């Protein structure tokens, strides 16, 4: 198959526009197409140029986690091409629809990018390799079994003839793909499994325009947006007359739930928006605040007949028989994703009725659906160009609010392309926040201090209620709200987990490692139990983990690498935590000091991860480092308060991101045991808060049960 | 009309004198390497050089940059890669990359002032915020540059 029609169409239209960087970026095939050389799509994932360049199509998004390069490595490994010839392009969501979703899932979240597509992308690579071999064998009129492929060259062994992939790609593409292909043993990997340089980095250090906010089209205008500060509110009335006189301002777009100013530069649009008189209908949520939300969650904790996310044994009877009963309540606040690139979407209604959208999205297909819905167009008449994300962390997947808005604004501009970018203030106050939650845990210990019963009550807003209501069980369980309790690895004979879904008006969403608050609660509480039992926190955990549990082996690996029990510098203390999630097993030892002013400083983190297989070790280590800093902000500083129905924080002065001085030493120990595929984007976040807070307890004797840490609580008195 | 010298080229721009330099660069001069992150000079994604000093361009009125030598990431190197950019590739520093153009501009300034910076120098100068958490590699890359001879590194790609 040669380049598909829709792609050619796009190239023609774009050429009429004078082209531009966007084309270079998304369509590396364009240059060859323009020179008349035949570019061959061997299969949906692999395009080969006559000069042997290989373009690997990537269906998932790239937000710095390295999935783009890792997937290319897996395809290239099986294709057995020359890695130096490999580049990537994002698969087109429009073609995806027209070709019956040929690229599988485009969703990029849950640390799934590699693990949930590794099988079919590797098979695509292997299948293409076999087809190239068959094509060469046919040309030589020899049995394919006498030929072998390697490093982009097919060799006929008996005659020592060779052909390059680029020479036979066109013939190969006409062949019927093999039914079954054998995948390489990861032990034999030459391209996958190695720390190759990420393919997206050179453009990023050069400052090339690769992000959603960098899109530029001829005649493009810029938009800044305001939504009702109170979630759920609507626009009642605006006074636009004065603003429309401001320099560069082209239009004020009023929709039911937002107002946008369109101007010839973003600054002009945003200045005008600040001066625009907007009267909001705040709806019924204008009085909600931290107190009403806490009261809502506490009502849930006290409610009778809650649905049970786990029931093992007889918790009540075991609790009554216990030698010691320990109870604790933990909580954590709403948190914004704070992607450094604010939400953005560029949309253009072409003269021929086709809609093109450029956006930083974690799910190209979801963006396509959102754009089509907002435009009132069939999916086939919309294209989404996936740009690099300036951070995602879950914000740009499920909710496609920014795409719907960008399309609505462009629709009002009748054929003029418009780039919408949110201000930081808008981004901070209109997120899909990590849910605030309160959890009560009650444990029964026997005379030896063993945990024989655990009863957990969770009050937490439901992410699924907002983003995927169909995924809530008929009993009313949202798995993202109960995980780490309903799947706790510790061998505790009597367990009960109750879930109170209390939703409130603040939109909630997948925030990196959704449910990770529960890992904080559980692993700190286990620490409390170990201390109550007079046991070492590591020994206490190991005593409850089965011999073949990978939670045990990662815990042992982390403890060994950290030198658990060895001497530490004065004032430095250790804490430990273990958690499995997103397909991987993770354990961590944190070394922390606490200043006289009560400020914790994380000195060193040792994290062990078993993800089964590792495609790019360096990228996996980078993700562990990333999770440490991301989580550190939530431990030390971050909280989104709610007052008068709105989020109080507005920018980085009151929602603090850690800086370089707070970055601890991170040592990542990769201990892949094979046989399964786990993720890396989120797992290292899971044990961070409990490991750090357990170390803070070791340092101060004070137990942190609410995040972020308040230094006043830890100050030496 | 305001006269600006950006990356050794003169530009006449017809904009409000109070428009921040960032938006003149991004929306009027087609130089989108400097990024908007906060608009209040906190995150540093907008860092460019003005007369060799690192400046948060999101709050600097363009009028204050008239007649001065402005350098953006696009003009950092005349021949491909500046050695700091090369070090960023060698040490696999960026993740999403959004903050990194500003981070690189700050690092270039730091190394110009202190060719062998201490960790404390790095902490004081590298105030750019990174949501992905690339700080450890930023530090490693800067230290590596301090150790390396001040000639462009060999490209390995």
Image (cartoon, coloured by chain):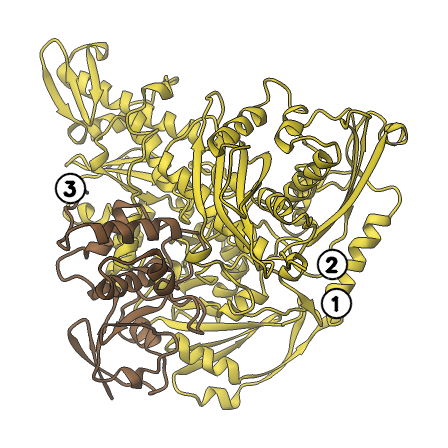
Q: Which of A260 and A638 is in front in this view?
A: A638
Where residue A55 appears, x then y in whole percent? 27, 39
- Identify the residue shown where x is 18% and y is 39%: A38
**Residue ID for mark 2:** A504
**Residue ID for mark 3:** A37
Q: Using the image, name the chain to which the residue with label 1 belongs.
A: A
Secondary structure under the numbered disc 1 in the rendered image = loop
Where residue A640 appears, x then y in whole percent? 62, 62
> Image quarter for residue A233?
bottom right
Q: Distance between the residues labelled 3 and 1?
A: 63 Å
Secondary structure under the numbered disc 3 in the rendered image = loop
Q: Using the image, name the chain to which the residue with label 2 belongs.
A: A
Find chain A in the image and tell me its colour: yellow
Q: Is residue A375 among the parts visible in the rendering?
A: no
> Image quarter for residue A458?
top right
Contact, mark 3 vs mark 1 (Cβ under 8 Å): no
**Residue ID for mark 1:** A288
- Residues packed near mark 3 inside 10 Å, few (<14), some (14 to 19) or many (20 plus): few
> Image quarter for residue A600?
bottom right
Where residue B143 appears, x then y in whole percent? 28, 51
On screen, residue A31 versus residue A64, left or right, reads left
Q: Which of A702 and B36 is in front in this view?
A: A702
Q: Is residue B121 above or below residue A413?
A: above
Where residue A418 appears, x then y in whole percent? 41, 69
């Amino acid at each position: 198959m040669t380049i598909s029609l829709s792609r050619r169409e796009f190239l023609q239209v774009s050429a009429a526009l004078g082209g531009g960087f966007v084309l270079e970026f998304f369509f590396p095939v364009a240059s060859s197409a323009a020179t008349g050389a035949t570019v061959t799509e061997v299969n949906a994932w692999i395009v080969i140029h006559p000069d042997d360049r290989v373009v690997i199509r990537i269906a998932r998004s790239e937000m710095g986690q390295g999935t783009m390069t890792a997937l290319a490595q897996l395809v290239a490994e099986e294709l057995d091409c020359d890695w130096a010839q490999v580049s990537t392009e994002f698969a087109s969501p429009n073609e995806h629809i027209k070709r019956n979703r040929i690229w599988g899932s485009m969703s990029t979240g849950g640390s799934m990018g590699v693990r949930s597509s590794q099988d079919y992308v590797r098979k695509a690579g292997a299948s293409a390799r076999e087809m190239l071999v068959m094509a060469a064998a046919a040309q030589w009129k020899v049995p394919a079994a006498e030929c072998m492929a390697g490093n982009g060259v097919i060799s006929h062994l008996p005659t020592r003839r060779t052909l390059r992939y680029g020479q036979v790609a066109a013939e190969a593409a006409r062949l019927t793909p093999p039914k079954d292909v054998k995948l390489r043993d990861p032990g034999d990997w030459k391209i996958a499994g190695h720390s190759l340089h990420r393919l997206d980095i050179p453009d990023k250090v050069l400052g090339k325009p690769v992000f959603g906010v960098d899109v530029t089209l001829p005649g493009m205008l810029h938009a800044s947006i305001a939504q009702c500060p109170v979630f759920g509110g609507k626009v009642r009335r605006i006074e636009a007359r004065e603003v429309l006189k401001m320099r560069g301002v082209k239009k004020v777009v009023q929709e039911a739930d937002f107002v946008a100013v369109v101007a010839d530069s973003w600054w002009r649009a945003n200045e005008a928006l600040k001066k625009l008189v907007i009267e909001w209908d705040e709806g019924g949520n204008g009085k909600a605040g931290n107190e009403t939300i806490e009261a809502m969650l506490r009502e849930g904790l006290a409610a009778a007949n809650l649905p049970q996310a786990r029931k093992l044994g007889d918790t009540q009877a075991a609790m009554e028989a216990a030698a010691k009963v320990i109870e604790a309540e933990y909580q954590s606040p709403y948190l914004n994703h704070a992607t450094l690139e604010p939400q953005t979407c560029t949309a253009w209604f072409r003269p021929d009725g086709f809609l093109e959208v450029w956006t930083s999205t974690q799910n190209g297909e979801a963006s396509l659906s959102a754009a089509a819905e907002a435009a009132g167009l069939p999916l086939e008449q919309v294209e989404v160009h996936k740009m690099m994300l300036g951070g995602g962390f879950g914000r740009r997947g499920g909710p496609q609010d920014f795409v719907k808005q960008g399309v609505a604004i462009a629709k009002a501009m009748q054929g003029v392309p418009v780039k919408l970018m949110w201000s930081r203030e808008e981004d901070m106050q209109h997120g899909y926040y990590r849910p605030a939650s309160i959890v009560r845990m009650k444990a029964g210990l026997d005379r030896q201090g063993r945990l024989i019963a655990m009863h957990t009550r969770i009050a937490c807003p439901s992410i699924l209620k907002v983003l995927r209501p169909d995924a809530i069980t008929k009993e009313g369980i949202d798995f993202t709200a109960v995980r780490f309790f309903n799947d706790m690895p510790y061998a505790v004979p009597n367990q009960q987990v109750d879930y109170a879904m209390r939703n409130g008006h603040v939109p909630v969403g997948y925030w990196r490692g959704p449910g990770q608050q529960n890992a904080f609660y559980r692993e700190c509480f286990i620490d409390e139990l170990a201390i109550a039992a007079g046991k070492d926190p590591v020994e206490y955990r190991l005593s409850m983990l089965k011999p073949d549990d990978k939670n045990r082996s990662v815990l042992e690996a982390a403890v060994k690498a950290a030198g658990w029990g060895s001497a530490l510098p004065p004032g430095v203390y250790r804490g430990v935590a273990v958690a499995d999630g997103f397909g991987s097993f993770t354990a961590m030892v944190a070394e922390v000091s606490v200043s006289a002013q009560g400020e914790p400083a994380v000195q060193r983190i040792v994290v062990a991860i078993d993800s089964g297989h590792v495609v790019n070790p360096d990228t996996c280590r980078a993700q562990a480092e990333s999770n440490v800093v991301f989580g550190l902000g939530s431990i030390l500083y971050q909280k989104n308060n709610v007052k008068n129905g709105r989020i109080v924080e507005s920018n980085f002065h009151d929602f603090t991101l850690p800086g370089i001085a707070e970055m601890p030493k991170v040592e990542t120990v990769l201990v892949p045991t094979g046989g399964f595929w786990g993720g890396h984007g989120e797992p290292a976040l899971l044990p961070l808060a409990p490991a750090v807070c357990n170390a803070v307890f070791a340092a101060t004797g004070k137990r942190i049960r609410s995040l972020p840490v308040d230094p006043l609580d830890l100050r030496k008195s | 009309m305001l006269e600006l010298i950006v990356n050794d080229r003169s530009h006449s721009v017809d904009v409000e004198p109070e428009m921040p330099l960032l938006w003149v660069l991004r929306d009027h001069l087609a130089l989108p390497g400097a990024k908007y992150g906060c608009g209040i000079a906190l995150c540093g994604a907008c860092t460019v050089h003005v007369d060799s000093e690192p400046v948060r361009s999101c709050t600097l009125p363009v009028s204050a940059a008239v007649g001065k030598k402005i350098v953006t990431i696009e003009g950092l190197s005349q021949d491909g890669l500046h050695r700091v950019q090369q070090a960023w590739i060698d040490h696999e520093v960026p993740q999403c990359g959004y903050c990194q153009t500003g981070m690189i501009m700050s690092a270039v300034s730091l190394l110009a002032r202190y060719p062998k910076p201490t960790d404390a120098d790095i902490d004081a100068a590298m105030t750019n915020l990174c949501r992905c958490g690339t700080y450890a590699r930023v530090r490693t890359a800067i230290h590596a540059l301090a150790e390396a001879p001040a000639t462009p590194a060999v490209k390995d790609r």
